[in-house]
Amino acid sequence: MNKSILSSSLLLLSLSLTACGEAAQTPGKVPQDARPAAKADAHGHEETEGQGKGGRGEEGAGGALKLTPAAREAAGLVIAPAGPATLVENLPLYGVIKPNAERVRSVTARFPGVVRSVAVKVGDTVRQGQALASVESNESLQVYTTASPLSGVVTERFTNPGEQAESAPLFTVADLGTVWVELSLFPRDRARVQLGQDVRVSATEGALAADGKIVFVSPLGSGATQTVTARVLLDNSKGEWTPGLYVRADVAVGRSEAALSVPVAALQQLEEGTSVFVDGPAGLAPRRVKTGRDDGRRVEILAGLSAGENVVGEGSFVLKAELAKGEASHDH
């Protein structure tokens, strides 16, 4: 081989090796195929080797978050397509639980006499025909039994052994399988409340709630409170609604159609404004939207979304927090 050619070849090889060595030692010049591959941590978030236990979901293009299926499940994300909905206009009212007066009975003695024994106390559950007390008749001196006319709960007791039984009630028994919700309705709202309207009744404390219907609107008002009573019949077969307690009721007084809507839980306030997280090819990306009417469950979308796009409802606040963490780390 020609000596000049051999010398040139050796020089090129030397320069090549020197360049490779510099690239390996220069920070930030790691070949793409030599970078550690992404993997999922124990919580399902994608992380790269060396990211450690604190790794979060990766941030994709345009601020989109990429979460593994396990991470989505752990975050409690509920994703559903945006679409039409019927918005319900609710009128909030307040009232009190009362026994269903049509299922309350007063128990009296059949004949005047002396009460010889009493078998029940207030709060006892009784069945129809069960003995409540025994009375000795003043005329015949025969002892007879006073029984419950229906199954229910003893809510009042007015007698004790040795007392005289006359025409006054000895007991009150109420069937609390259904209860009434007596709502206070102000005159300005009277025309909006009608028989048969749906009502959502909620306890003032706790998560107890149930659905019922308006079954009665009083034709008379109360001079003391300047209100009219509207009544809801509520199922109480589980005994959850205690007479005497105050409740809130949302009466459905109107309905309207929204061509495009999302759950209220989908809305988050970001720097860009009111936004939702859309599940797309790049991940879970925030999208600014313009909103319209809402009924506390669904909100109308006027701009920013198309029908059928998958939107995060429950759990969207978790994504907002993840996005904020990413922005904070970028600031540093």
Image (cartoon, rainbow, N blue to C red):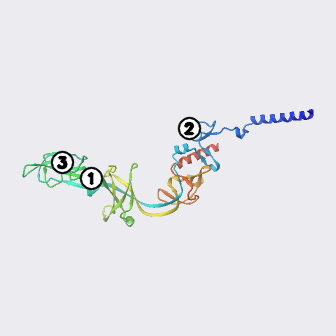
Which quadrant would residue 70 be assigned to in this image? Answer: top right
Query: What residue would you read off at disc 1?
Result: 175
Vertical placement of residue 31 versus 209, above or below: above
Residue at 70 percent of width and 39 percent of height = 33
In the drawing, what numbered circle is on residue 42?
2
The earlier-in-sequence mark between 2 and 3 is 2
Q: Horizontally, is 194 left or right of 304 in the view?
A: left
- Which image quarter holds the C terminus? top right
The earlier-in-sequence mark between 3 and 1 is 3
- Which image quarter holds the N terminus? top right
The image position of residue 227, as x and y in percent, is: 34, 62
For label 3, the crowd category at 10 Å Cα-Cα, with few meaning under 14, some 14 to 19 and many 20 or more, is: some
Q: CA distance from mark 3 to mark 1?
A: 17 Å
For label 1, the crowd category at 10 Å Cα-Cα, with few meaning under 14, some 14 to 19 and many 20 or more, is: many
The image position of residue 216, as x and y in percent, is: 32, 62
The image position of residue 77, as x and y in percent, is: 52, 48
Q: Could you say which is closer to the camera, residue 331 or residue 259? A: 259
Helix, strand or loop status at disc 3: strand
The residue type indicated by label 1 comes to: Asp
